[in-house]
Image: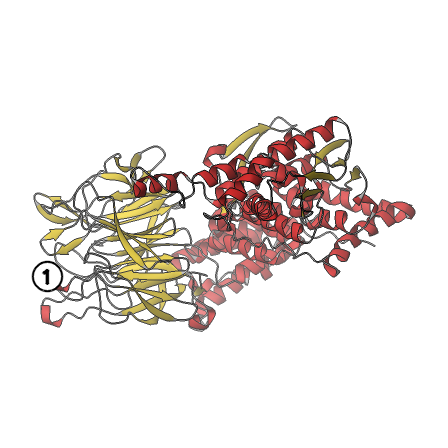
Amino acid sequence: MEFTRPYLPLEWEERWRRDKERRKRMIEEGGEKMQEENRRLSWIKAYNDNRMGVKHSVWQESTHNYRLPEDEGGTARSTDETGSEERKQTYHSATYTQQMFQTLEDFRHSSLLTDLTLSTQNGQSLRAHSSVIAAVSSLIQQKLQEQDAGCSRGEIQVHLGPEVNHLGLAAVLEFAYSGAITTLHRDTAAQIQAAALALGVQRVLDLCEGGGWEEQKDNGNKKKEEEKKKRVSASDQLDVSLRAIRQLWVEKVGCDVVLEAEDREFTAHRVVLAASSDYFRGMFSSGMRECQQRSVSVPSLGGEELEPFLHCFYSGALDLSWERVFDLVCSALQFQIQPALSLCLGFLEQEIDATSCLDVASFAEAYAMGDLLELADDYVLRHFQEVSVTPKFQDLPAERLLGYLCCDGLCTPSELTVFRAVVAWLEADLSERLPQARKLMTGVRFPLMTFREFCEVRAINLRMECSADGEVELHGTALKDFGLGTASSEECFRVRRPKDALVLIGGDQLNPDMGMRLPSRQLWFANALRSGVGLVKDIEWRTLGDIPEQARFQHGAAVMAGKLYVVGGCHFYANNDTMKSGFCYDPLHNTWQKIADMHEPRSNFTVVVRESALYAIGGDKDSNTNLDSVEVYCPDSNSWRFTRPLDQALSGHAAVVWKGDIFISGGMNCEHQCLVSVFLYHPEKGTMYLSDMAHDRARHSMESLGGRFYVAGGVCNFRKFYTDLLACEVYDPIGDSWCSVAPLAIPHVGAASAILEDKLYVLGGYSQEDYSESKLVHRYDPTTGRWQNVGRMPGPNTDICACVLRLPDQLRQ
C-alpha cells in the first residue's frame, strides 16, 4: 500500500519518511510483523464492536477547560540536542481527574481489569482495582509492596474481620472512586468508620469525624460551620487520590506491566493505561496474549513520546512546545490517547500565532482534522498582513494561497496589502512562480484600491513585466479591473462574518429636549464586517429583538455560559427611574427569562463574570448617591447576595477580569471627581491599589486583550470641568506599569466596548464638551497600534452596552 505525501512543512519530513519506511518494511517482510500490526489494529475494532459491557469513556472537552497551573510553574525551558532552547508550557485539563475516576468506576462495575477482592466475614465480597484502593488505603498499599518485594503478581484477596460489613465496605469503595460517600449519615457512620479503620483509610475517618450529624456541645451551629469549611470537596479528594496513584507509579508500587518502546522500558498500571487510552484498553481487555504478558512492546512509539504520555495518564498534564507538539498529536491519534490529544489541540488553539498558523493548517489538512484546519485558516485570514511577512508564507502552494486571497473573510488594512503579499510570494522564486502570477492576481480586488494605491501596483507590475521580458502581462489586466469598475456592489467589499457576533444592548440618543429622548429596548448585532475602497469600512447591523419590559441605559451587561445577562440601569432621568431588575437571554432558544432583582437599584456601574458568577460593582443609586456595595449573582440559585464592599463609593468606573481577579480603573467618587486610581478587588481578600493611570478618567472603556488592559475614552477633570479625554493607555498587570497608545480621533464618553477577533472596539458615546453624539465605531489593532473607523452605529449611541455573543446560524441568515 503506497501513501501519498500531502503538503507538510520540512520539520515533518523525517517523521513522514520514517513512518512510510516502517510500513513498507512490514509489507516486504510480511509474516509475523505484518500479522502483529494487523492484530494490534484489530484490538480497537474488537473493542468498539464489543464493549465488554463497559460504557465507552468520553473525553470530549472544550479546550477552554485547559489551563496553565500556577503551582507547576507554567513555563519551562530546556535545551534540545542541537543546543537550541526549547520553551515548554504545562497544559492541564481541569476535568481530567473526574473523567478518569468515572471511567475507573465503570471498569469496576463491569469487573474489567479488577485485581482485588475484599471480603467480609459473612461471605459478601466486592471487586476493585488495587492501585485505586491503594491510593486511599494503607493496608492495600502494604499488600502491593509485599507483592513487589516477593516479585509476584496476581490477584489480591483481603478478608476483613467481623467488624466490617458490606455497607461500610461499599462506602469506602465509593469514596475511592468518587471522592464522596452518599450513604454517610448518623445511622451509618459507625459502620463506615469500622471499614475505614480496618482498611486504613484515614481520609474517610476524617470525613466521618467532621460529619454535621454529630451533636456539638459548644456553640453547636458555629462549630458545625467551622467543620463544614474544613471539609474537602469530592473533586479535591479525587485530586489527592490521583496524586497518590501517581506516587505509586513513581515508586513502582503495584505496577503490573512493562512497556517497551524502542530501547527503553516503562512500568505502569494496566488499569490506568486502559482508562486513558482506547488502544491500551483494547490491548488489555480483548483476550489477546498481551493480557497475560508482563512486558508488552509498543510499536512505532519512541521513548521520548511514551514518557510524556505516561505522565499525562497519571496527572492530566502535558509539557508542550512547538518543537514536540506535532509529533505528540500524531502518536496520540495513532494510539487513540484522547486526553493527550485534547491537551495538544488546546495548545495549538491557544498558542497559534503568525509564525505557526500555516504549519498548523498544513498539519490539520494532512491528518484530516477539520476543526483544527478551520481554526488555523481563520487565523491566517484574520492576521493576513502579519502572516504574509513570515518565511513560511513563501512556502505556500499556489492553490492554497489563491484560496486565502479569494476568501471574503480576508482581513487587511487595504487591498494593497494583498497585492504586496502576492508580489513577495512571486519574487521568492520569480523564474518558477511567474507563470502563476495571472491566476493569483485574480484574488486581488483592484477595484477596492485608491488611485494612489494603484500607482504602486502599476510600478511593481511594470518592473515584473520587464524582468520577465513581457512573458506575463499583469499591468493591463489590473488596469482594466481598476478602471472599468464593473464589479457589483457586493464585489466592491470584502465581507467577513465573524463566528462571534458583536451585540449592542439598549442605550439612549441625546436630544436637547429631554421629553423627546427615547431610551431603547433594542438589541443589535454586527452580522458582517465590510471592507471597501481604500480604508473604507462598514458594519452590517441586524436587530436581535427587544429587552423585555422597560427600555434601559447606563445598565450592565455580561455573557456567562453562552447567555447574555442584562441588569440595572435607568429607564428615564428621574431619581426613581433607576432599576434593579434583570433578564437573561438564551440565544440558542431565542428566549428571555427574568432573573432575581438586585438588592439595590444601580446605574452607571459595571458587571463582570468571575468564577461562574456575576458581580455588579458600585454605580449610582440615584442622581446624588453612588454606591460602594458589590453584589454577586449565582445562576444556580437565581439569587443575589452582598459581598465585600469597595473601599469607596464609585460610579462611571470600568472593570475587567484577568486570571480570576477583578481590576477596576477610574470612575467618580462621592464628590463627582474623576479618579486616577487603579486597584485589584478581591471579594474575600479586599483591595490592593496598583499604579495610577496617566490621566484621571470616568465613563471610559477598559478591556483585556493579550494579557494587557486597554483604556480608552471617557472624561477627566480639567480645570475643574469635565473635559473629553482622547488619550488612551495600556496597563501591563505583570509589570504593574502603564504606557500610552494612539489617541482616539473623536470623543467617546459613555461608549460601549468589546473585544472581537483580537481587536478592541469602542462604539458610540458622546462629547462632554458640546454634547454631540459619536455615531461612529472605532477599532484598535494592537499589532499596528492604530485606530480605524469601521462603521456607524445602527441606533442608540450613548450609555449603551456591548458584548460578544455566539449566535446560532438561524439568527444570522
Question: If the image is split into quadrants, where does the C terminus sit?
Answer: bottom left
The residue closer to the viewer here, 516 or 770, is: 516
> In the image, is 404 to the left or to the right of 268?
left
Image quarter (top left, top right, bottom left or bottom right) of the N terminus = bottom right
484, 773: nearer the viewer: 773
State the scheme by which the image is colored. secondary structure
x and y percent of residue 506 in the render?
26, 65
> For the image shown, how many numbered marks are present on the structure?
1
Location of residue 150 (image quadrant): top right
Tell me, yes or no, if residue 689 can be seen here.
yes
Say above or below: 649 vs 52.
above
Q: Quadrant of residue 434?
A: bottom right
Mark 1, residues whose alpha carbon is within 10 Å: few (<14), some, or many (≥20)? few
Q: Which residue is nearer to you in this view: 474 or 206?
A: 206
Above or below residue 304? Residue 403 is below
Q: Can you say whether 213 is above or below 594 in the image?
A: above
**Horizontal placement of 805 versus 151: left or right?**
left
Whether residue 471 is visible, yes or no, is: no
Q: Position of residue 603 (x, y in %)?
A: 19, 57
Judged from the image, the secondary structure of the residue bearing numbered disc 1 is: helix
Type of amino acid under label 1: Asn
Residue 588 x/y as whole percent: 43, 68
Q: Is residue 487 above or below residue 177?
A: below
Image side of residue 452 versus residue 346, left or right: left
Task: Return the residue nearer the eye: 702 or 480.
Answer: 702
Q: Which residue is mark 1?
A: 575
